[in-house]
Image (cartoon, helix red, strand yellow):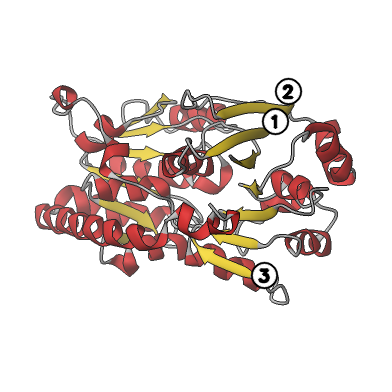
Amino acid sequence: MKKILFMLKHLSLGGAEKMFLRLLNYIDLEQYEVHIKLVFGDQIQSMPQHSNIKVSSIFAVKNDETKKLIKLCPEKIYDDNVFEKYDIEIAFLEGYPTRIISASSNSSSIKVAFIHTDFRFFHHSLNAFENCECEMSCYQKFTKLFFVSKAARDGFHSTYPLLSPKYEYIFYPPLSDRMMSFDEKYEKIPEEPYFITLTRLAPEKGLFKLIDAVKKVKDSGLKIKIKIFGIGPLYNAIMQKIRQENLDECIFLMGYCSTPYCELKNSMGYICPSDNESFGISIEESLFLEVPIIACRCPGTEEILHNGDFGLLVSNSAEGLFGGISEFIENTTLRLILKQKAIKGKDYWKIKLLSSSNFEKLCLPDTNI
């Protein structure tokens, strides 16, 4: 039986973690042992129960000391914590997992790195390296690079134009109707119409911009309600701004929910206010549930919404969001058009994902199974 090591930063709330859990559905656990090594022991997401899935962590918490150890002594971290020999070693996130797997002492393993972000706009992974040269050197040790979108690939090669991996692929986050299932008896809930946002409460997600836009909508005399599902470091700051702007009856922080698909399905529209996105898993989920979408324009949202064919792209500003949301509320025809665009997007991505997100075909053939 072949062994696969996945190294993740953690299993908290985020698009990469959600993508990873989806990916497990595409691995034949009767043929592969999957070991999941978390760099930091933060685990919110629940794992499938299977004898061939094992989970462990390297550090209980993330702090300055543990981050420094990874940056300066990745070989020691690997040797002290990876005790078995694996056929495939996968760094499933940029930064710390990539740094550690690049220091692998297993010369016979296939090494794979996933890139989930657009380095042109959000190069967070540099926190794990001394400089860009060090990061580029680490990526040169990988056999295959997987990018979650064309935007992520373009951003990577714009940052490291001299790096030429042996193999590289665009691997869109896999999704199926089965993954989006929820109890149908809860599908229709009588409630005041609302928009919805599913996101981490983090700086790059543009939530202060969204609050400013909602303030403009309210001041213009329109009624609006938005539910924001997610947790993150900006929770207190966001709550404070909502209260300062007297928007307590307009914006609701709903906290964490692993499967908010009933709420998403019942919403009047999905809003993505992100400053940048490499792809946008929540937009993908909205398309699969045929929910109209309003998104701030950036390379990732342009890609998943096909430059506006599958949703409404607005300028990446509070003013742009204000205009898009206001028109959506006031214009019944626009709402119907965006509903049809979402259905069109669902059909497109269902076909696209079948051809571009086959993990076993792209990643596992070299194991000679």
- Which quadrant would the N terminus be assigned to in this image? top right
Query: What residue is drawn where x is 39% and y is 56%?
Result: 319
Q: CA distance from mark 1 to mark 3?
A: 28 Å
Residue 237, percent across and down?
56, 31
Question: Is 115 in front, or is 176?
Answer: 176
- Would you name the residue on which mark 1 appears? 40
- Would you name the residue on which mark 3 appears? 165
Under mark 2, the amino acid is Ala
Q: Is residue 104 left or right of residue 16?
A: right
Query: What residue is drawn where x is 33% and y is 58%?
Result: 354
Q: CA distance from mark 3 to mark 2?
A: 33 Å
Query: What residue is drawn where x is 57% and y is 33%?
Result: 234
Q: Do labels 1 and 3 touch, CB within 8 Å?
A: no
Most distant residue in the bottom direction: 162
Can residue 314 be seen by looking at this rendering?
A: no
Under mark 1, the amino acid is Phe
Mark 3 neighbour density, 10 Å: few (under 14) some (14–19) many (20 or more):
few
59 to 213, vertically: above or below: above
Under mark 3, the amino acid is Pro
- Would you name the residue on which mark 2 appears? 60
Q: CA distance from mark 2 to mark 1?
A: 6 Å
Q: Which tag, 3 or 2, sits closer to the chain's start? A: 2
Question: Is 15 in front, or is 139?
Answer: 139
SS category of the residue bearing label 1: strand
351 to 322, vertically: above or below: below
Q: Do labels 2 and 1 touch, CB within 8 Å?
A: yes
SS category of the residue bearing label 3: loop
